[in-house]
Image (cartoon, rainbow, N blue to C red):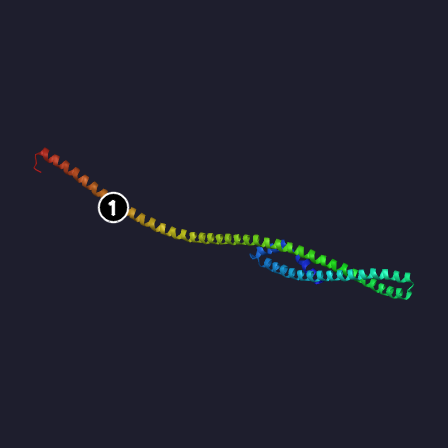
Amino acid sequence: MASLLEKVSTLISANLHYMVDQALKTNSVAVIDQYIRQVESNLEDLEEAAAAVGGEVKSIKRRLDDHEHKLAEMDRAVDAFLTEGNEAAAVAVQSRFNSTKRLVETYTEQLARQETEFKKLLDAKVKLEARLQTMKQEREELQALLELAKSKEVTVKAMKSLDDLMGSGDADIKRIAQSIHERLDRASTASEMRAASLDEQMDQVLERSTLDAQLAERKKRLGLSS
């Protein structure tokens, strides 16, 4: 019984904050679940022990009440025999009275010890049940927190992967953009070249037209046939 109460006392005094910290560090409620299993197991032992001790308390009380009743009867009987002058009977009953009184004292001591033990078990049960309820609530909140943390972790990883992808994509895009710019530059250069060629041709045509017009005017002035 003492070892059970010691184990229960250890569970009751367990540092819940430490367990929560450990759960957060390991990203797992395993340590909490283990504690809950231990508490539930010890609660069952406590209930069995309390039931046993409680039963003993009732039995001792019943025997004590019975012997106290007999003790009262024997006490009256001794007085009655003495009144009647039956000393021999009074001595015999007094002897039984003394034995019964010692037994009553023993039962009284046993009852006090068992009641104290029973009270300790009930107190431990109440405290352990409260711890269990608290830890179950903590577990739910912790589980939700860990799921949120995992979700955020996944998001962070996804964002990192996206960043890596975007980084790689940026390089690819840069290469593609550079290629496009190069083609545009070449096309622009070719266009400029064509434009330059066209301009030259236009200049040449315009200059030739001017020359032809000037020559035609001269021929007219000189009376030459075209």
Disc 1 target residue: 194
Q: Could you say which is closer to the camera, residue 206 or residue 176?
A: 176
Q: Could you say which is closer to the camera, residue 55 or residue 168?
A: 55
Q: Tag count in the figure?
A: 1
Residue in view at x 36 percent, y 51 percent: 176
The answer to whether residue 65 of the structure is visible from this angle is: yes
The crowding category of the residue bearing disc 1, from other C-alpha atoms within 10 Å (few below 14, some 14 to 19, many at least 20), is few
Farthest top residue in view = 221
Give the percent coordinates (x, y) of residue 147.
53, 54
Q: What element carries label 1?
A: helix
- In the displayed structure image, the side of residue 190 where residue 54 appears, left or right: right
- In the displayed structure image, the side of residue 90 where residue 217 appears, left or right: left
Give the percent coordinates (x, y) of residue 205.
18, 41
Q: Could you say which is closer to the camera, residue 2 or residue 45?
A: 45
Q: Could you say which is closer to the camera, residue 223 or residue 103?
A: 103
Farthest right residue in view = 85
